[in-house]
């Protein structure tokens, strides 16, 4: 019972972190035009690498969803899919953080060029 509570607390904490990162990313996105962002991304390889790393986390999240569905259909105990749910939220938060880093880098390079 305690382990389930701990996992739920971790899940909620990760969801809050994801929400904060998402809000910050949206603020950065709204400051620039698509043309500015495209120009910077074409010139800087580190942004592209960061986005590729975020896609890896997205793939791991997809696998976690499949494993969650499998554990539910096979009638495993609740703690198994709660662990997978925490892994899913962790990967989603990590993905969002990497995208936030890429947007921050874009904003830095755009502000530096103007």
Image (spheres, rainbow, N blue to C red):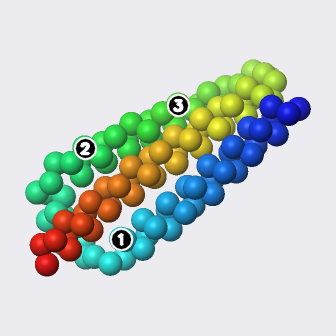
> Which residue is the site of mark 1?
29
Say above or below: 45 vs 110.
above
Q: Residues within 10 Å of mark 2 (few under 14, many from 20)?
A: few
Q: Position of residue 86 (x, y in %)?
A: 65, 38
Identified at 39% across, 58% down, the residue is 100
Left or right: 107, with 4 as reference point: left
Q: Quadrant of residue 55 in the image?
A: top left
Say above or below: 59 vs 14.
above
Distance in Å between CA atoms under marks 2 and 3: 22 Å
Left or right: 3, with 54 as reference point: right
Report if the CB atoms under discs 2 and 1 are less than 8 Å apart.
Answer: no
Identified at 62% across, 49% down, the residue is 14
Q: Describe the element under mark 2 as helix, strand or loop.
A: helix
Say above or below: 58 vs 20.
above
Whether residue 73 is visible to the viewer of this picture, yes or no, is no
> Which residue is the site of mark 3?
63
């Amino acid at each position: 019972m305690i382990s389930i509570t701990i996992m739920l607390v971790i899940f909620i904490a990760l969801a809050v972190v994801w929400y904060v990162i998402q809000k910050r990313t949206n603020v950065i996105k709204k400051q620039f035009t698509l043309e500015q962002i495209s120009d910077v991304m074409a010139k800087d390889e580190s942004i592209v690498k960061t986005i590729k790393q975020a896609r890896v986390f997205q793939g791991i999240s997809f696998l976690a969803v499949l494993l969650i569905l499998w554990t539910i259909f096979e009638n495993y105990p609740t703690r198994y899919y709660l662990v997978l749910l925490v892994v899913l939220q962790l990967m989603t938060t990590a993905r969002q953080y990497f995208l936030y880093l890429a947007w921050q880098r874009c904003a830095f390079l755009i502000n530096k060029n103007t």
